[in-house]
Amino acid sequence: MLINSFSDTLAARTTVETWMRDFQNWLCRQLETADGGATFREDLWTHEGGGGGRTCVITGGRVLEKGGVAFSAVWGEMSEAAARQLLMPAPGYFATGVSVVQHPRSPRVPISHMNVRYFEAGNGEAWFGGGLDLTPIYVDEAQARWFHQQIKDICDRHDATYYPRFKRWADAYFYLPHRQETRGVGGIFFDRLTVGKDGDFEELFAFVQDVGEVYGRAYTALMRQNRALPYTAREKYWQLVRRGRYAEFNLAIDRGTKFGLETGGRTESILMSLPPQAEWPYNKVPAPGSAEAETLAWLRQGVEWV
Amino acid sequence: MLINSFSDTLAARTTVETWMRDFQNWLCRQLETADGGATFREDLWTHEGGGGGRTCVITGGRVLEKGGVAFSAVWGEMSEAAARQLLMPAPGYFATGVSVVQHPRSPRVPISHMNVRYFEAGNGEAWFGGGLDLTPIYVDEAQARWFHQQIKDICDRHDATYYPRFKRWADAYFYLPHRQETRGVGGIFFDRLTVGKDGDFEELFAFVQDVGEVYGRAYTALMRQNRALPYTAREKYWQLVRRGRYAEFNLAIDRGTKFGLETGGRTESILMSLPPQAEWPYNKVPAPGSAEAETLAWLRQGVEWV
């Protein structure tokens, strides 16, 4: 066996994997209800090392132009290069998670991302990771503050240090150094919450479940609040430009995308996070004082939203 | 001095840099004439380590929807990480080059790329690199063969081993492993043609000049041949999907882009290579026997075009 096979590890793994599957279903139904137009289609796939996944994709919704909720549970041995890049203590691994990106049609509804994941390395170490962040095309300050407050509330139920630590981590992670811009208004990001070191299995798993659920509740609330807001052609164009930045982050910077592609994950499931369309005009700089310039001014690290 | 300061090195550097500047002008005029609609605008910029560049961008042309011809001559010390990634023998460097990407409006005119570059490392080693490749939205076999023949002809004038070696290198370099697709029909790619080892300065420099010039002649010929061909909305849509692949290559794979962003190059000059727009539909697979499927069948390594 490549991976630790003690019976308690197997039980933990099965428990997490089952919740991930159920959570995927729950989240798809929440998003479909808030969309009111389209439903998710499912693609099943297998991983050559072992395991596989179910990718659920929605397109052409009333609110969601393109979105994905991807579940996977895979195992095997990764390449030395991938193991090094991920600071894995051993090349054998088991990984399960749900990854979500939603690209709404309207520039008034933010792009959103959420990921929860559980890893076991070949040496028996096990940890959770995850995060969520919001990318408004135009920052609505009150909504950004409300979004962060929802996250802080669930963090505080588990550990008062989580929100400030993981909010800073999100600021550092969801960042485009070549643009000197954060991806959006952030949220939280955490990795390597290690079982037995950072908490016991039940505590850490309960936190990760709360992270998944707060995403579902908060994002569908924002969809409902903003879906009927009118917008102009100029605002739609700005959305396409911001989607270009989103593609830059996912393709050039995001470690999750690199991990997936390098470990032979299913390309269409990994790259479902890319926007339906994007534009790259040369050197577009918004006019000072414009709504676009105002949004750019928010896209920096260290903003205290709560 | 970070870099070798023998007077012959300085003379070599100045000679190459001057040619690069002149070549940028020549190429912009060639492309403007073949376009017949728009002209290049210039942006000057400086590099914080030393040097700078001139980025020439054309938008809204009759043929060229967005294209760039970027000259730079920069020096300084790169980060340890960048030096390692580039296998640089020392962190001090001087680099000058011209990089070109053209995104035509019509799906009948291929996307094209060309780069010529000259490096000096802090230990006095100096080398040339470069390449060009063609990315048709629909592969026209005869044109692809003609394009490769033009390149082979100039290669053969210098060294009979160049075309076969550098053609294979392009197949390996312009490749998207996660798609198992080449970027297009390829061309040539070469790096580290080292002065004193792979040829003397004059020989290697003359080859690199020919690479730049064959690009200008061959690509403007293709622009003229294909610019008036009619196309459908479906063909335009396929172009947007293929442009998505182009963005994937440039952002996730291309070492030149990484080098530029990591050494603090001007972001808008580096990312001018990104398409004006792109689309990422989920899991689009062309129907068997369609023109799109036929093009995909060409996008593999090892096709012998001449």
Image (cartoon, coloured by chain):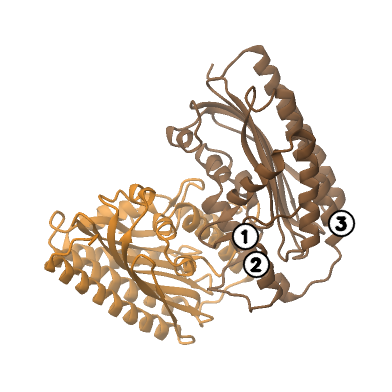
Chain colours: A orange, B brown
User: Tag 1, which secondary structure?
Assistant: loop
Residue A231, quarter of the rendered image: bottom right
| Residue A36 drawn at (x, y percent) | 45, 87
Left or right side of B106 for B125: left
Question: Which amino acid, by three-letter code, is at mark 1?
Answer: Arg
> In this orientation, does residue B292 appear?
yes
Distance from the alpha carbon under mark 1 to that under mark 2: 7 Å
In the picture, residue A183 is in which quadrant?
A: bottom left
Q: Earlier in the sequence, mark 3 or mark 1?
A: 3
Q: Position of residue A100 (x, y in %)?
A: 39, 70
Q: Is residue B103 among what the camera can see? A: no
Q: Chain of mark 1?
A: B
Q: Identify which residue, A145 or A102, lies in the foreground.
A: A102
* Labels 1 & 2 near each other (Cβ < 8 A): yes
Residue at 62%, 25% in the rendered image: B197
Seen in the image, is B116 located left or right of residue A213?
A: right
Q: Which residue is mark 2?
A: B297
Of pointers 2 and 3, the one earlier in the residue sequence: 3
Numbered mark located on residue B171 in the image: none
Labels 1 and 2 in the same subunit: yes
In the rendered view, tell whether residue A101 sits above or below residue A167: below
Q: Say if B15 sits above or below B153 in the image.
A: above
Query: Amino acid type of disc 3?
Result: Arg
Give residue B96's position: percent from left, percent from top: 65, 31
Instruction: Give the answer, above or below, for where A236 lies relative to B20.
Output: below
* Mark carried by residue B224: 3
Mark 3 vs mark 1, CA separation in Å:
27 Å
Q: Residue at x 45, y 33 (%)?
A: B79
Hey, what amino acid is under mark 2? Answer: Ala
Quadrant assignment for the N terminus of chain B: top right
The chain that hosts pointer 2 is: B
